[in-house]
């Protein structure tokens, strides 16, 4: 999460270089080479992540009724291999590749959202609950099946999770509300939390990657003053 100047960025149809890190697409696999230093307490992060898509989606999905913001789950179902030398770790499992794009800052359109992605029988389930600046709630419940494509499904009931250390409110959806819990908080900040959540979808227990975003908090001048320390800027 380092912002870099124009001179540190180059790209082609299959390659993106940002400072010392890069991504390369060969038609079947996305290879991500990471070579960074963490902020605040400097530590080297160096390694390779390979993402092998099991399904590719070739169009974005609008998140608001005006179409100002879109979410593009490029590879909602994928096999991932991670090998790092700093720190010394490796991992194999399922994952995904997505990105958001918009015509204006997120905080101008939304006040908050909760999002989760989980592997379920038949593919990947994604749940989105958003509240826009006009107070309208928008919910998405989408099943990505590598064999049959993309379908909507009826979202399960909302479940309130425990707040994070920064008192971030967290909400998800699950068919078994009494057994839906936060297993681990992976990232915690005044306006954002990413967590592993135990949930039940399509009658099966699963572990979802979950995020909560509070854009009212993000707008706070105190929080804005903290951002350069968490996401430093480099011009090389």
Image (cartoon, helix red, strand yellow):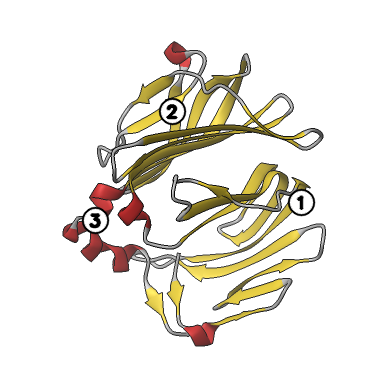
- Residue 204 horizontal side relative to residue 178, left or right: right
Question: Between 229 and 125, which is closer to the camera in this rendering?
Answer: 125
Q: In front: 204, or 149?
A: 149
Instruction: State whether residue 123 appears in this view.
Output: yes
Q: State the residue position of label 1.
A: 52
Residue under pointer 3: 219
Residue 120: percent from left, percent from top: 66, 26
Q: Residue at x 38, y 29 (%)?
A: 171
Residue 52 in the image, given as x and y percentages of width and height: 76, 51
Asked if residue 149 is positioned above or below residue 40 in the image, the reply reads above
The CA distance from mark 2 to mark 3 is 23 Å
Q: Residue at x 30, y 63 (%)?
A: 227
- Can residue 190 be seen in the rendering of this structure? no
In the figure, is residue 39 to the left or right of 153?
A: left
Quadrant hosting residue 2: bottom left
Residue 217 on image: x %, y %: 24, 49
Q: Quadrant of residue 166?
A: top left
Residue lying at 34% horizontally and 36% vertically, measured from the top left: 136
Residue, disc 2: 172
Helix, strand or loop under label 2: strand
The outermost residue toward the left is 222
Q: Residues within 10 Å of mark 3 (few under 14, many from 20)?
A: some
Q: CA distance from mark 1 to mark 2?
A: 28 Å
* Disc 1 residue crowd, few under 14, some 14–19, many 20+, Cα 10 Å: many
Local crowd size for mark 2, using a 10 Å CA cut-off: few (<14), some (14–19), many (≥20): many
């Amino acid at each position: 999460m380092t912002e870099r100047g124009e001179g540190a960025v180059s790209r082609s149809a299959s390659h993106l270089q940002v400072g010392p890190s890069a991504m390369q697409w060969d038609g079947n696999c996305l290879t991500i080479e990471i070579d960074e230093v963490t902020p605040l307490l400097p530590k080297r992060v160096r390694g390779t992540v390979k993402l092998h898509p099991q399904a590719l989606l070739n169009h974005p999905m609008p998140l608001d009724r005006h179409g100002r913001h879109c979410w593009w789950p490029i590879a909602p179902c994928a096999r991932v291999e991670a090998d790092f030398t700093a720190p010394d770790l490796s991992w194999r499992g399922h994952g995904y590749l997505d990105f958001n794009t918009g015509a204006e800052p997120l905080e101008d359109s939304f006040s908050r959202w909760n999002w989760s992605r989980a592997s379920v029988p038949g593919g990947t389930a994604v749940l989105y609950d958003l509240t826009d600046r006009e107070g309208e709630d928008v919910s998405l419940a989408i099943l990505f099946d590598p064999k049959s494509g993309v379908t909507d499904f009826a979202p399960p009931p909302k479940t309130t999770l425990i707040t994070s250390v920064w008192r971030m409110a967290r909400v998800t959806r699950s068919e078994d509300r009494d057994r839906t819990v936060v297993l681990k908080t992976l990232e915690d900040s005044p306006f954002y939390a990413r967590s592993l959540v135990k949930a039940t979808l399509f009658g099966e227990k699963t572990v979802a990657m979950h995020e909560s975003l509070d854009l009212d908090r993000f707008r706070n001048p105190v929080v804005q003053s903290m951002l350069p320390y968490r996401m430093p800027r480099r011009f090389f």
